[in-house]
Image (spheres, rainbow, N blue to C red):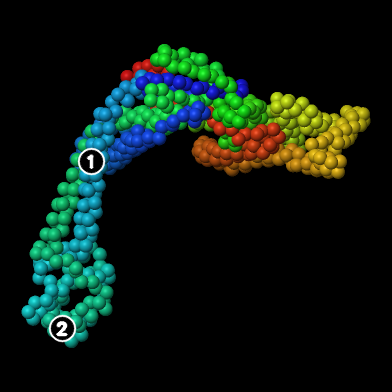
Amino acid sequence: MAIARMSRLRLIGLKSDKNRIMNELVRSGSFEVIPTSVEGERPTDRSHLDKALARQAKTSFAVSYLAACADEYAALRTQNEAAVKKGKALPIREAAVEKKRKNGRTEMGYDDFYDVAAKEYELLAVCDALEKWNFARLEYKSRLQKVRAQLRAIAPYEAFPLPLSVLGDGKNTVVLLAHAAADTPLAWGDAPVFCEKYASPAGATVGVVARLCDKESVLAALTAARFTLCPLHDDRTPAAISAAYRAEEAELLQKDREAMYAVLDYYKYYNELRALYDVIGQDAEKSAAELEFVATSATFVAEGWIPFERAESVIKKIRQKTPKVITFLSDPQEGDIPPTLVVSKKIFKPYEDVTNMYSVPAYHEIDPNPFMAVFFFLFFGVMIGDAGYGIVLSVAALLILRFCKLERGTARLIALVGMGGVSAIIWGLVFGGVFSIAGIPSLWFNPTEEPLLMLGVSVVLGALQLLAGYALKAAKSFRNGHPLDAVLDSVFIFILFGGIACLALDMLLKLSAPLTEVGLGLLGAALLGILCTAGRHNKGVLSKVMGGFSGLYGLVNLLSDVLSYARLFGLGLASGAIGAAFNTLGSMFFSIPVAGYVIGILLLIPLHAFNLGIGVLGAYVHNARLQFLEFYGKFYEGDGRLFRPMGEKTKYVRFVSPSAASAAARRKA
């Protein structure tokens, strides 16, 4: 459990072998490219990279478009099935689409991956075809919007029986057609007017015939009643116009649906297109890496970081591909900033994500995860404090990890919560908490009955973590060649806590008077030691003295850090109290025979689920805060960067060993 030792690998090879060498470096998953330190000419032609990114964008569109069309078909099929059951429609045509599409990454071996690469030309032709169908469907949909706009425009006038060409001024008369949102009475005055109302889907529609000389007064009357003249002109009746538009609408819908089916005919390429996206992504990554190389007319020089333990194996595999290669391995030099690769046991892996959320460990730093994991595990259980909740969390996490294919980050989070459930089971038995049911005996004490003892346990756990932080700070100083700082910056803190522990034991247990004297002596020695040594690095006597007093004042912050662990007490107590309140609420129905128990249990399940959800969220967030501020603040440097080898950045593919790939293929078959 440590940060992996990194080596700088410099590789000189023939340009003719570059592709094979790069493929092997990618396949190893162990090489992170860095700018070559050798002086020489660097490639400047980005055309291949730009073309690769363009091909990848084309593939990305094809994948997302196929998925969108598949979702559109699924929704259409659901609507159709409901209509068929009611006898209002016939079944639509079947399409070869997965009912439950897998949106996660596909497990694949490198051989299958490169088989997809060999089909790139064929698959890009599929992408081109999908783009053409997309443009066709966009044209259909654009025309469909215009047709529907025309239908909305003609709808108020459909009942008008005459061609729209009759509208307008005649020799002696004028014919008007108007519509209003509300049926408002019309006042024509003294003008002789023929007015006829027509059915309208909303509002009122009127046809008006008047003398040409009365046109202005008729228009004024229509305007006053908020009528709007029909703006349409055609030789057909509104009903005929509407029928033509509806026929065109149906035709466009049919064409769009046929186009959708044509798109879904390419759905058989969906998984291969997803893999092709990552194939091209690797090509783009290699092209970007080559811009960091130095090259001559026949050779190239590549450089990058590689874990020391994997270096010889990777070099051996490269030599199997081509013997015409020269390699140099060297340790990081002064000024280098190697990436961080944490190598830890499987049980500690979930906790790495918690640390990385704060800051990645620096390369030369002690791996903090094993130490943090112990306290994170303990604190999670204290904050939940219920064995029943712990069982639910552990069993749920186990089932999810066993039967669900999850991304690595998600799986680690689920595993972390599952381990927190184990801790909750342990502390729940210690506290006598099982779904907050009253009367269950505890192995030690019940926090709701002895809250001060719970507070004391929380503070003691916090003090232990802080001391562990100071111990790691001392180890860091020893490692960096500063043994005096290691002793003086930490030993007096241990003496201080020892003195406080003696006084606390004497107050609680009344063991003996000498224990108090020992405690006071340790406190005095610690304070004197901090006063004399805290300012040792300052220049000048006065500055050293002021530094000593500053060190004493800094103990206030230490006290604040210790009190921060009272949140263990608060969250643990709150979870139990809320659960007990829910139990009281549910038990109110138990007085009703039979049905009361059913109602009460059905009520308690969501209430306890809510309490558990809030408890898990609080346990994670506040636990992380304690690690980041109180614990890591004592020794942790951070500011590292994660090791990012070539070939790791895949969106749709997760590489597995050949045996695992074969097993997955057999399961699929």
Q: Are marks 2 and 1 in contact (CB under 8 Å)?
A: no
Q: Quadrant of residue 467?
A: top right
Image: 665 above or below 276:
above
The answer to whether 489 appears left or right of 11 in the picture is: right
Q: Quadrant of residue 186?
A: bottom left
Nearer-the-camera pick, 100 or 49 = 49
Say if residue 139 shows up in the picture. yes
Nearer-the-camera pick, 506 or 41 = 41
User: Which residue is depicted at the point 41% across and 15% down?
Assistant: 324
Q: Mark 1 highlights which residue?
A: 132
Q: Mark 2 highlights which residue?
A: 214
Q: Quadrant of residue 156?
A: bottom left
Nearer-the-camera pick, 592 or 428 = 428
Classify mark 2: residues with Cα within 10 Å, few (<14), some (14-19) or many (20+).
some
Image: 80 above or below 374:
below
Q: Amino acid at mark 2?
A: Asp
User: In which quadrant of the rendered image does the N terminus lie?
Assistant: top right
